[in-house]
Image (cartoon, rainbow, N blue to C red):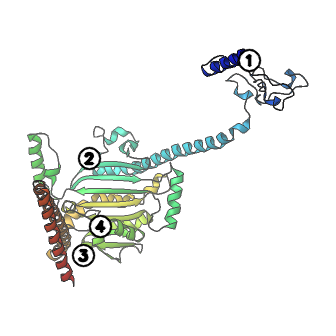
Amino acid sequence: MAFQSDALAAKEIVRGLFGGQKPLTPQPSADDDFADFASAPSPAPIYSPPSDSSAPTAASFPEHETLPTGAPTVPYTKWYRVWERTSPRDFYAEAIVIPFILVLALLHVWGRRTNKRKAGQWIAAHAPLLHKEFASIGFDRRRGISDYEGDFSGLLKEKTAQDYVTYATGRQNVAFVDLKIRLLKRYNPLTLLFETVFSFLFESIRPPKEVMEATIYAFDGKEKDLVPVKSKAEWDARESRFKGLPNSGYDPCVWAVVHKEQMKGLRDERYDVSLTVTKDHKNLPQWASVMSESAEVTEALLTTELIQAVEKAGDAFEYLVVTDQPVDKPLKLDEATPRKRVILSLRLPSSSHPSAYDRTIPVFEYFLKMPDTLVMTAHFRSEVTRKIRATREDEVKKLKKADEGEKAEERRLEAEKKKKEIRDTRLKGLSAEEQRKFLEKEREKGQKKQEKRMSRKA
């Protein structure tokens, strides 16, 4: 018996080692200390909404039971029945944002239309005068002035919501004239507000304003080079037509009549005006002044008709500039090439009535005819011409000196680059020991040069 029990015990040990059937674990009794861990608690039931469209309420459950914790607090309805699942308080953010966007959109549309209407009013008041002086107005050469039937807004081209431009050509002594109207940013009231506020806080920021700036480019005796021809017949016709015309050239000068409020800004912004000297004139109103390179130029160009036109324009007048120099300070010789122009700047009236432009039309008309005045009177004494030419030659000399310095620097850098390429090529052909000796000699030469420079400074 003892032998049989020992054999059975050995058999159970072998089964345990080689994967035999494990003995069943005895179930804990109710009296054991760890009886609470003998079995896991049954999972709580998961709530799922009913399939129909009706919402679960307390009436659908027994009186002694409550709604499950995971039950929704809003009715469950079809996806399109939004009004049954929402309330007005869910749209407070939209109620603030959407009206704000609508107001901005309406202001943008109103601002663009107002600017377009104001630009149209200006061209309507000045189109007859432009038609009287020029053969072609606007960018569409196929349409004449009579084709617009009183609506001259088609003569303008909208570059931006605040900038409108037009163009005119076909006049003696004038190659062409560019007209630019700049209006307020009514379409963007926030930007307009910031610009207005910052202009009061910072003197460097100019306040927003509505202006018209026109620039006449004179022929200056270059009609044959500027007027295009398509055939030999047109060339011959142009030659015969220009033979009977007087020379459209005049002496170069920089001269201006400026409103005193614009004087500082004009001198800071324009290089050509910085070459002049400012002087008051007894015949001009107190708020206007003359900027000229010579008193003789002022005597020739400041006519009685111009004085009367400036007085009538009043605060709407900003400046009238006769120049042959660039607006920005030239940095290269090509930029210093003279180009004769006449520039007029006028403020636009705040009123939309057509009669609001009556006071600026005389000075605008004089501006269009001023190239004729320059051709007839802008021929000065040799002393004055020599002085004006000397000023330009001094500026050209400075540019030439700067240009020569830049070229010398470029040549030096190019020579150093070639020298470095030769050195690198030479080093590649040397052995390691020869390279070491070559670099030591280079270092010694550099040290000697540095010592010489220090001794010279001492």
- Per the image, label 2 sits on a secondary structure element best described as loop
- Per the image, label 4 sits on a secondary structure element best described as loop
Residue type highlighted by circle 1 = Ala
Q: Marks 3 and 4, how far apart in space?
A: 17 Å
Name the residue that disc number 1 marks: 2
Name the residue that disc number 3 marks: 294
- Per the image, label 1 sits on a secondary structure element best described as helix
Name the residue that disc number 4 marks: 271
Q: Marks 2 and 3, how far apart in space?
A: 35 Å
Q: Earlier in the sequence, mark 2 or mark 1?
A: 1
Mark 3, other Cα within 10 Å: few <14 / some 14–19 / many ≥20: some
Residue type highlighted by circle 3 = Ser
Q: Earlier in the sequence, mark 1 or mark 4?
A: 1
Q: Earlier in the sequence, mark 1 or mark 3?
A: 1
Location of residue 173 in the rendering, given as x and y in whole percent from the top left corner: 21, 56
Point out the image quarter for the N terminus.
top right
Q: Earlier in the sequence, mark 3 or mark 4?
A: 4
Q: Residue at x 40, y 50 (%)?
A: 163
Point out the image quarter for the C terminus.
bottom left
Residue 131 visible? no
Name the residue that disc number 2 marks: 135
On the picture, is 278 further left or further right than 94?
left
Q: Of the residues tagged 1 and 4, which is closer to the observer?
A: 1
On the picture, is 406 further left or further right than 327?
left
